[in-house]
Image (cartoon, rainbow, N blue to C red):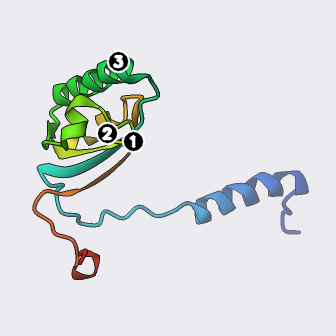
Amino acid sequence: MPPTIQPHRLLPISILTLLMVSWPARADYPTPPPPKEYDVEIRYQIYASRNERIVQFQDMVRYLESIGFHKKPGSDSEAELLDPNQTRMSGTIASRQVPQILLDRRVKALCFRPLDSRCPRTCKSR
C-alpha cells in the first residue's frame, strides 16, 4: 500500500508552494544612469507673520543651499517677501541630493526633470 500524506502536513506544504509560485521574479533590466543635475521647482508654505516669514524663508534657503541647491533669481516680492502667496522657487541640484529637499518641513512638493530636457511640444504655453 502506498504511503499517504496526512492532512495536517498538507496545509504547510500548500502554503509554501503558493508563496514560492506567487513570489515575483527579479529581472535586472538595463536602465540609463541618472542625470548629474536636475532642474527643480519647489512649492513651499510658510505660515507666519511678515517678520517671522522672512526669517523662516531665509532659513529654508540656507538649508537648501547647504545641500547644493542653486536657486534661480525670483521676483522682486520674493526677495522682500511682501507677497505671502509667493510659494514657489526654482533652481538646480545634483541628482543624489534631490531627496534631501523634502527634509525641510516647509517644502510641500517638488517637481524635477533632467537639466537638459525640454517639455514636449504639447506642454508649451502660448
The quadrant holding residue 117 is bottom left
Q: Which mark is residue 85?
A: 1
Label 2: element kind: helix
- Residue at 30% from the left image edge and 36% from the top image edge: 101
**Is label 2 or label 3 in front?**
3
Residue in front for this viewpoint, 18 or 124: 124
**In the depicted structure, whether residue 81 falls above or below residue 25:** above
Label 3: element kind: helix
The quadrant holding residue 112 is bottom left
Type of the residue with mark 2: Pro
**In the depicted structure, whether residue 87 falls above or below residue 59:** below
**Is label 2 or label 1 in front?**
1
State if disc 3 and disc 2 touch (CB < 8 Å). no
Crowdedness near tag 1: few (<14), some (14–19) or many (≥20) residues, C-alpha within 10 Å: few
Residue in front for this viewpoint, 6 or 76: 76
Q: Dot 3 corresponds to which residue? A: 51
First reached walking from the N terminus: tag 3 or tag 1: 3
Q: Dot 2 corresponds to which residue? A: 99
Crowdedness near tag 3: few (<14), some (14–19) or many (≥20) residues, C-alpha within 10 Å: few
Residue 115 falls left or right of residue 61: left
